[in-house]
Image (cartoon, grey):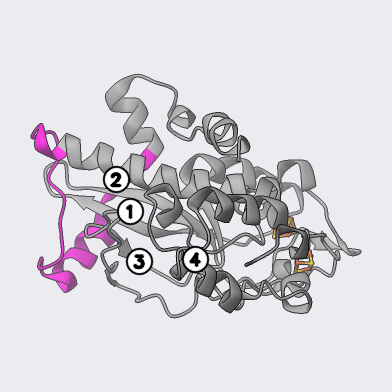
Amino acid sequence: MYNLDDVKTFKCLCCGECCQNFLSDEYRGKKIGEFAERNPFIMNPFIINLSDIYLPFFDWEVDDFLQELKKINSTRKIVPIKVSFDLKSERTIVHKYTLDGQNCPFFSNNKCNIYEKRPIVCKQFPCMHDLSGLIAGQETKLYENTGCKFERENELKHDLLKNNRDKGKLSGSEIISFFKKRYGDSLFYNLEGAAYGIRSNTFLINLEKEGKIKLARKGYNLKYLLKKIDNSEAIGFSKLYEEITGNPRKSIYDMDSTKSYFSKY
Ligand code: SF4
Ligand code: SF4
């Protein structure tokens, strides 16, 4: 049986590796310019990956990060990475953006110079495993390489965790306790990211059922679609959410509820 006392709690070594080489297993090998593989929990057959993912942002984070770049006279670009296309309004819906290229310009002297304003992905790091299944009581996908030096030096013992889980020796709540001990708040950012994916995609699917949008899906001529995306107006998902519901754009990202729900484990 896996003992919770054996789980070593993450402690940042301030090495900066994660700020200089963003490509962890989670992001490596994504198909570019194609529809995402269907993930049963995230329901994503209408999402296209447009470029490699380096430092990903939710759409409402982009303006603040651009402001920070401006302050240091950086010409680095932020580009869309995960998009859907609404055939009805001919608009591109952007789910996520990324800083283009490796290396974050804000890491120097062994620290993040915008620590209080760092993006959510940096708050989530290094808990980058695909834990969306935890929410649905299903498989979790653990990555060997999260791109973190501490993780490398203090193995998670994936096999042990996996074997215990597969043999039914670990309950869902024990698995969550395991990750909570390992990652603390990073876990909650991970889980809210997964819950947000489910919530935002469900929102789009419901809009489609109501006839308000029509999403291009797998099977649509991709070459033609990518041209359309290039030449269309783009709207961030949360902006679309605000436009349609009248609710503040960030209200669909609900970290407080996720934290309070999973804190009980
Ligand atoms: S914003 Fe800060 S924590 Fe995030 S990648 Fe850049 S330097 Fe690292
Ligand atoms: S790679 Fe891991 S240990 Fe190093 S700075 Fe990033 S989070 Fe901290």
Task: Point out the stretch of residues depicted in magenta.
Answer: 208-237
Q: Secondary structure at mark 3?
A: strand
Per the image, the residue denoted by label 3 is: 49
Contact (Cβ within 8 Å) of mark 3 with mark 4: no
- Foreground: 46 or 104? 46
Per the image, the residue denoted by label 1 is: 42
Alpha carbon of mark 3 to alpha carbon of mark 4: how far? Answer: 31 Å
Query: Which of marks 4 and 1 precedes in the sequence?
Result: 1
Per the image, the residue denoted by label 4 is: 165
Query: Mark 2 packing: few (<14 Cα in 10 Å), some, or many (20+)?
Result: many
Q: Is residue 102 visible?
A: yes
Q: Which mark is residue 90?
A: none
Q: Quadrant of residue 152?
A: bottom right
* 4 vs 2, front mark: 4
Q: Position of residue 131 (x, y in %)?
A: 48, 57
* Residue positioned 89% across, 64% down in the render: 110
Q: Position of residue 185 (x, y in %)?
A: 68, 45
Query: Which of marks 3 and 1 precedes in the sequence?
Result: 1
Query: Which of marks 4 and 3 precedes in the sequence?
Result: 3
* 1 vs 4, front mark: 4
Q: Secondary structure at mark 2?
A: helix
Q: Which mark is residue 201?
A: 2
Q: Answer left or right for 50 relative to 251.
A: left
Contact (Cβ within 8 Å) of mark 2 with mark 3: no
* Residue positioned 21% across, 66% down in the render: 227
* 1 vs 3, front mark: 1
Contact (Cβ within 8 Å) of mark 1 with mark 2: yes
